[in-house]
Image (cartoon, grey):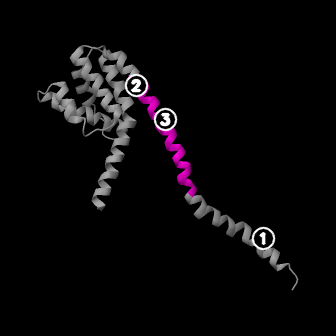
Amino acid sequence: MIGTLSRRRNDRRRLERRVRGLPSAVLLLQIATAAGLGPRRAIEVVGGLPIDRGALGTASDDFAAIGGRLGLGADLSSAIIRLEPENSSTGFVRVLDVLRRAELDGVELALHLELLVRDLRRERAVSLDAAAQRLTVSLLFPLVLCILPAFILLAVVPLLLGALSSLPG
């Protein structure tokens, strides 16, 4: 049971890092395609970047997994379909859908990636706002149980003791 909870927590953290790093990874894809690379080569380049840690590293690892499958001879659709169940982030699925359509239908990739980066950044800002609002609620517990009793002990109790000692007899 503890192992399951730990695994779920790690999966949730990885998903959060992936969501945070996705706009930057898509921006790198946009730069690669603006430089004249096709979708397959852009995925391989972004996946091959030497980024070890952080949110961008997690997103880059996902593109590296797709690039590895492409290097083994898989077509883009099958490489993406195998990765989608592991990465349930809707933003990542949207990025993969744009890449798939660009390869299959010849859709202009740079414009779609630019719009996608804007949407992903907006979604990330909304999620950060929601996290900040949840933080205020979660900070209420330590405030009530730790700081408020300390304030009472340090400020109110001495006043009461002083008032009680000055009472006659």
Magenta span: predominant SS is helix
Q: CA distance from mark 2 to mark 3?
A: 14 Å
Along the polypeptide, which appears first: circle 1 or circle 3?
3
Q: Is residue 149 magenta?
A: no
Q: Is residue 60 visible?
A: yes
Residue 94 in percent (x, y) is at: 32, 28
Q: Which mark is residue 159?
A: 1
Residue 18 in percent (x, y) is at: 34, 38
Secondary element at image label 3: helix
User: Which amino acid, mark 1?
Assistant: Leu
Along the polypeptide, which appears first: circle 2 or circle 1?
2
Q: Which mark is residue 79?
A: none
Q: Residues within 10 Å of mark 3 (few under 14, many from 20)?
A: few
- Residue that carries the numbered disc 2 in the rendered image: 117
User: Which amino acid, mark 2?
Assistant: Val
Vertical relation: 40 (above or below) 124:
above
Q: Residue at x 46, y 38 (%)?
A: 127
Q: Are marks 2 and 1 in contact (CB under 8 Å)?
A: no
Q: Quadrant of residue 54?
A: top left
- Residue that carries the numbered disc 3 in the rendered image: 126
Q: Residue at x 31, y 23 (%)?
A: 29
Along the polypeptide, which appears first: circle 2 or circle 3?
2
The C terminus lies in quadrant: bottom right
User: 119 or 57, which is in the foreground?
Assistant: 119
Start-end of magenta stretch? 116-140
Residue 55 in percent (x, y) is at: 36, 38
Q: Residue at x 64, y 62 (%)?
A: 148
Q: CA distance from mark 2 to mark 1?
A: 58 Å
User: Which amino acid, mark 3?
Assistant: Val
